[in-house]
Amino acid sequence: MPIKNILNVAVISPRYGLVGGSEHFAMEVTERLALNPNLSIHVFANKWQAMSDRITFHKYPIIKFPRFFQPISTAFFVQKMISKQKFDIIHTHERIFGADIYSIHGLPHQYWIKNIRKKKRMSLFDYYTHYIETKLVMNPRCQHLLAVSQSTKEIFCQSFQLPNDKVKIVPPGVDLSKFSCNERIQCRKDIRKGLGMSESDIVILFVGMNFEIKGLPQLMTAISKTLDKNLGHSLKLIVVGKGDFQRYKFLASQLNIQDHINFTGIIAQDIEKVYLASDIFSMLSEFDTFGMTVLEAMASGMPVIVSRNVGAKDIVTHGMNGYIVDADDTDSISSHIIELLNHDFRNTLAKAASETAQKYTWDRTTEQIQTIYDLYGNQ
């Protein structure tokens, strides 16, 4: 049954439309939802990139120092601003005190601190973040918890002792038009020329804002082991993102792959051209709730190599459109790279990866969330 009345919707996203997976997710979905004339959408953010005039933006302040004030000030000011208006739906992409819908883009903070960061004790920042998150998840008003992957759902249910049906999986999408393989030949020529690579090189792509957590050391080690076998292929690695460049350049020298790696830094515009210029994508994260770059790579027509801790493994069929590996098993990673050196085999997996990506569009993601919004319109 369609929505009959105009619903006032509050969407919380601290850096709406800016760099980051959750920010991009919030923007892509919210912009599409705003096309619905029965929705009046208000975005509450600290910073944002306005993509259209269909959304009303509200800026809330953040107390940045001392650091532990950041999460508590965000939750406080958002709550205060939202309470001044009547909203039918509060949909948050950030930890706040209460909402109707919570799109989960990260792990439970306490789990992250203990199991991923392996910290022995929580700081005040960690304590307040965990406190706010618990208030949100356990708030009776929060009836719709939306996880981006199966592994994220499982960890949330375990951490907060939630029934399995309390959390629904709503994976992100991809803008297929941006990653059209029709431009591959030209991108391959232009990007590779700019990076000093030849069109015959087999190029592995890494994209990440945290080299250590995203598994760059393991990937570099696997590439070194592959090159040591002298298989007669020119293998190169493009590293896009932000990290300790000096540390990893030194590691490249130690592994004797310094001539096979190119650090580009952050690419804010036209990054899809780098995808289209590459042959293989790898993400070997310690943990990623999803890993939108994996879906983007598949949309670009690349087989992927991902760790078992990457949520996007949900869309990878081992040996068919990519590989799922143990992040620290560099011998296994190297063996799969060697398999993908075969042109025909690589193309077979690339085609399958592209076909998989066709099923995961932002329109599909938006439809899933619109279905939840409709429940409020029918009340």
Image (cartoon, helix red, strand yellow):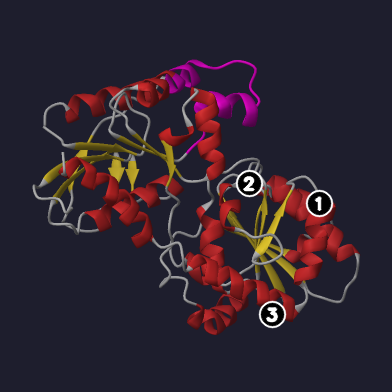
User: Which of 189 and 106 lies nearest the eye of the viewer?
Assistant: 106
**For the magenta stretch, what is the residue range?**
106-130
Residue depicted at x 34% and y 48% = 26
Circle 2 sits on which residue?
Answer: 214
> What kind of residue is marked 2?
Lys
The quadrant where residue 195 appears = bottom right
Is 110 inside the magenta-drawn segment? yes
Circle 3 sits on which residue?
Answer: 198
The quadrant where residue 103 appears = top left
User: Crowdedness of circle 1 by 10 Å Cα count: few (<14), some, many (20+)?
Assistant: many
Do residues under tags 3 and 2 come within 8 Å of each other at their CB atoms? Answer: no
**Looking at the image, is mark 3 or mark 2 earlier in the sequence?**
3
Is 78 inside the magenta-drawn segment? no
Measuring from the top left, give residue 192's x and y in whole percent.
62, 76
Q: Give me the C-alpha separation between circle 1 and circle 3.
A: 26 Å
> What kind of residue is marked 1?
Thr
Q: Quadrant of the C terminus?
A: top left
- Would residue 44 appear left or right of 186 to someone viewing this image? left
Mark 1 residue element = helix
Circle 1 sits on which residue?
Answer: 330
Q: Nearer the viewer, mark 1 or mark 3?
A: 1
User: Which of 113 and 186 lies nearest the eye of the viewer?
Assistant: 113
